[in-house]
Amino acid sequence: MKINVWSAKEEYKANRKKILKEVDKVFSSGKFILSKNVKSLELNFSKYLKLKYGIGVNSGTDAIQIALMSAKIGRGDEVITVPNTAVPTVSAIVSAGAKPVFIDVNEEDYLIDVNKIENAITKKTKAIIPVNLYGQCANYDKILKIAKRNKILVIEDCAQSAGSFYKNKPSGSLGHISAFSFYPTKNLGAYGDGGFIATSIKKFADRALELRKYGMRKQYYSENHGINSRLDEVQAAIINLKLKKLKTQINKRRKIAKIYNELLLETSLILPKENKNDFHSYHAYIVQSKKRDLVMNKLKKKNIFCNILYPFPIHLMRGYSFLKYKKGDFPVTEKLSKKIFSLPMYPDLKYATILKIVKSLKEATK
């Protein structure tokens, strides 16, 4: 039996009738874009986040770009983030017209090194985008103090952290604006692309609503240059359905992580660290090994497929060479890119399958 790092088949099988019922409702209504399901999701998810406003968009990438644009951050501005993230974080900054400025991450939790933030701030710095990577939130106590002192915005990249908490506050409610992805692999995943912007600041919400639809307030008249980033009704209906089960799904992920933590403790693998103030949602279960490629190949021979998040630091990618970074600029990120990999992790992973993965890992890491 093939064991994938992620699968939605079991979840779909269990909820097939309910999902297809919602899809049929959308098709029967004849309203496919920005209708009642999107409005319902915007209300429900912003309420879950304990925020005033929610805006459904086409993707997590668009959510970051529009969040920046809504705050009028663009050409000539700098945005601080990390090179140990998915390309979309950086792509969105560039697409908004701003310049990404990187700082390194912590080796223990893979999150932004808050002690390096202030040294990267210049007169051009307008925002920080901490990435709540793998399902764990950054240190927002320190980040928000730095941001307030320097009069800059905090835009949360929550693509991987739906269902996570920091000091009992939901991920997405910690900064000034937050951006979520509903990509299928996420904790709150659709069956296609989708994204979400959340905030309690009205001026940002109002602009984001316009910007997702060509800058229009009324049909066929653009107030500001915007983009086409409309969340469709089918994906919104599915996410509305899944939102009701998010807490249950996160608890399942945490139980799987606990089993991994206990059974892999005596191996040579470096296991993930859950910070004191965090409630980790385990979007991904990340481990480290000096023999990563060898271990992954041994697992592959047993039909167990892992993944690397992320094998190529963004500051070393050809597509971002114009930023003028070089090898050695961010040593922790570069070191991690050679050692980290993610184990199979999704809510419907069976206990017997987990035991097989653990047994194979123990053999592969001897």
Image (tube, rainbow, N blue to C red):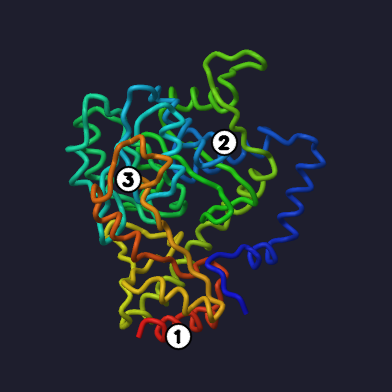
Pick the front one: 333 or 254: 333
Pick the front one: 160 or 281: 160
Residue 328 appears left or right of 38: left
Question: Where residue 351 appears, x then y in whole percent?
Answer: 52, 80
Question: Which of pointers 1 and 2 indicates the residue nearer the eye?
Answer: 1
Q: Crowdedness of circle 2 by 10 Å Cα count: few (<14), some, many (20+)?
A: many
Q: Using the image, determine if residue 62 lies above or below residue 312.
A: above
Residue that label 3 marks: 82
Residue 183 appears left or right of 52: right
For badge 3, the amino acid type reads Val
Name the quadrant containing residue 237. top right
Q: Crowdedness of circle 1 by 10 Å Cα count: few (<14), some, many (20+)?
A: few
Q: Using the image, determine if residue 351 lies above or below residue 251.
A: below
| Separation (CA) of disc 3 from disc 2 | 24 Å
Question: Where residue 16 appears, x then y in whole percent?
Answer: 72, 61
Q: Which mark is residue 149?
A: none
Question: Where residue 86 appears, x then y in whole percent?
Answer: 43, 49
In the rendered structure, which disc, 1 or 2, sits on the residue that comes first in sequence? 2
Residue 105 appears left or right of 303: left
Q: Quadrant of the C terminus?
A: bottom left
Q: Secondary structure at mark 1?
A: helix
Say if residue 260 shows up in the picture.
Answer: yes
Residue that label 1 marks: 359
Q: Crowdedness of circle 3 by 10 Å Cα count: few (<14), some, many (20+)?
A: many
In the rendered structure, which disc, 3 or 2, sits on the residue that comes first in sequence? 2
Q: Which mark is residue 57?
A: 2
For badge 2, the amino acid type reads Val
Pick the front one: 21 or 69: 69
Q: Secondary structure at mark 2?
A: strand
The residue sitting at the right extreme is: 28
| Separation (CA) of disc 1 from disc 3 | 35 Å
